[in-house]
Image: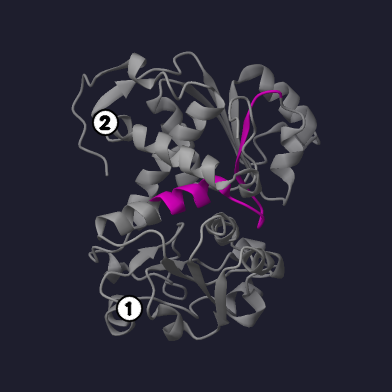
Amino acid sequence: MAFQGQHILSIDQLDRDAVEHIIQIADNMTPYATREKCCNVLDGAILANLFFEPSTRTRISFGTAFNLLGGHVRETVGMTTSSLSKGESLYDTARVTANYADVIAMRHPEVGSVADFARGSNVPVINGGDGANEHPTQALLDLYTIHNELEALGKKKDTIKIAMIGDLKNGRTVHSLTRLLCLFPNIQFTFISPQALAMPDKILDTCHDAGLNYSISEDFHYGLKNQDVIYLTRVQEERFTTQEEANLYRGKYCLNQSLYQQHCDKNTIIMHPLPRDSRPEANELSDDMNDNPNLAIFRQTHYGVKVRMALFALVLGVEDKLSHYEKPMNWYSPRHS
């Protein structure tokens, strides 16, 4: 795949070679992401960060990634603060924003909205999540996390057993990650959810077409056993018609340290796309897991910055110029990892 000038809208755009190239470039971002060096290769470039749906990590991660390469960030947060609330179309918003920015990161609550927006933009658009559909950059950082965590544990990366647990119907992160993992052989999936929140058939069809094995169950304890990775998700209450309907499923699957010790292998990696719902009635990933060394959720956020730095460098065509624009740090900053 030729990245320069291209939109990043869907995992379907990427083949295995493209994914491995992104991972390689993300590795090259390590000294800048860990604040060992500065890099201003994007000095003067502008990112328009358009987030029309609530976000903390993804929005700040995109902005941080761009700043760490020397670029500038302009943001719009929330539908009501934009001209979309006045009836402006996504196409018109894209045409205007593309005049102000060199690249655009966008999140929107409607499925397919970011692709619709990209049709009006002549600068690269990166999908930060479109409704319950896709979240390609999260999938890439999740894969990067899996590879790094397995390597740190001395485990092989060519055979991965992963359990995805929770709201698999509405969770765009599990949709994109499953499709991404289907590019690799010897992935074994276990999908654990209430029947009403099961993984969509089109995602299961992708697994089948890739020749990968998967099992489906509602049994939480079964899903914890014999896994390399457990990927938990919260109930996506914003995707339900009513709060009462969402409440039927909140708290159904709750992982704590006791259950981990009872049912998980010693070095099972625990992941979550965040935010985790820490309210007592939900609590799908208990705070008592915080000291578990295999809890990777906060390392995921660090890996995410590197992956998004890589994508910005690739779509703006500077991935081979990084070392020419680096310099020593002038201030104290703790090592980020």
**Circle 1 sits in a helix, a strand or a loop, which is it?**
loop
Q: Nearer the viewer, residue 256 or 238?
A: 256
In the image, taking residue 312 as reference, residue 114 lies left or right, namely right
Q: Nearer the viewer, residue 331 or 223?
A: 223
In the image, taking residue 101 as reference, residue 31 lies left or right, namely left
| Residue 16 vertical placement versus 71 (above, below) | below
Q: Nearer the viewer, residue 206 or 159?
A: 159
- The residue pinned by badge 1 equals 264
Image coordinates of residue 226 in percent, x first then y, are 37, 78
- The residue pinned by badge 2 equals 35
| Residue 72 vertical placement versus 30 (above, below) | above
Name the amino acid type tagged 2: Arg
On-image quarter of the N terminus: top right
Name the amino acid type tagged 1: Cys
In the figure, residue 32 lies in which quadrant? top left
Tell me what residue is drawn at x 34 percent, y 65 percent. Answer: 269
Q: How many marks?
A: 2
The crowding category of the residue bearing disc 1, from other C-alpha atoms within 10 Å (few below 14, some 14 to 19, many at least 20), is many
The crowding category of the residue bearing disc 2, from other C-alpha atoms within 10 Å (few below 14, some 14 to 19, many at least 20), is some
Closer to the N terminus: mark 2 or mark 1?
2
* Magenta highlight range: 122-144
Image coordinates of residue 309 in percent, x first then y, are 44, 33
Tell me what residue is drawn at x 25 percent, y 60 percent. Answer: 154
